[in-house]
Image: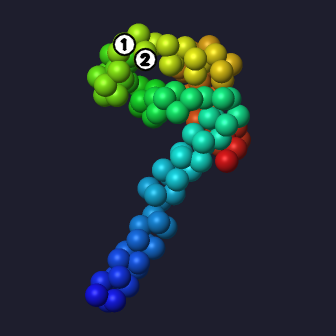
Amino acid sequence: APHLILLFRTALSQASQSQAFQYFNSFARLGSRLATDHGLSESEVKLIPDILFGYNNEEIAEKNFISLDTVKSHIKHILKKTETKNRVDFISKFFTSPDRVQL
């Protein structure tokens, strides 16, 4: 059994150094920072990846098992709290320029 643990630790160590892992780790830190700095609720933060991937309101509602009105309300609150005008403005403000992204 100890050799299996060593093998698992080695594989996990390699995976944590991968570019994909680093990308998602950075995204998680940015999401946490947005939530803290702008007072986003947990429900609102959960919708951020869907906004970034370009899902429409209906797709977001179906994917997250919530009503269309709830999606619209959460997105409205995200935009208001982050002082952005629309989804494109939100994405460009927080996710497009390395100069703007502060982890």
Can residue 61 be seen here? The reply is yes
Single out the residue that lies furthest toward the top: 69
Note whether residue 48 is visible.
no
Residue sitting at 68 percent across and 29 percent down?
38
Which residue is located at x 58 percent, y 17 percent?
77
Q: Amino acid at mark 1?
A: Leu
Q: Position of residue 92 (x, y in %)?
A: 60, 28
8 vs 20, left or right, is left
Crowd band around label 2 with a 10 angstrom C-alpha radius: few (<14), some (14–19), many (20+): many
- For residue 65, which quarter of the picture? top left
Please report the residue visible at 50 percent of the width from the left and 19 percent of the height from the top.
Answer: 74
- Residue 3: numbered disc: none
**Which residue in the structure is indicated by mark 1?**
68
Where residue 89 sits: x, y (%)? Answer: 60, 21
- Residue at (67%, 47%) from the top-left corner? 103
Left or right, 34 with respect to 9, comes to right
Residue 12 percent across, percent down from the top left: 41, 71
**Kind of element beneath mark 2:** helix
Residue beneath disc 2: 71
Q: Are marks 2 and 1 in contact (CB under 8 Å)?
A: yes
In the picture shown, does residue 83 fall above or below 27? above
Q: Residue 6: image x %, image y %?
A: 38, 85
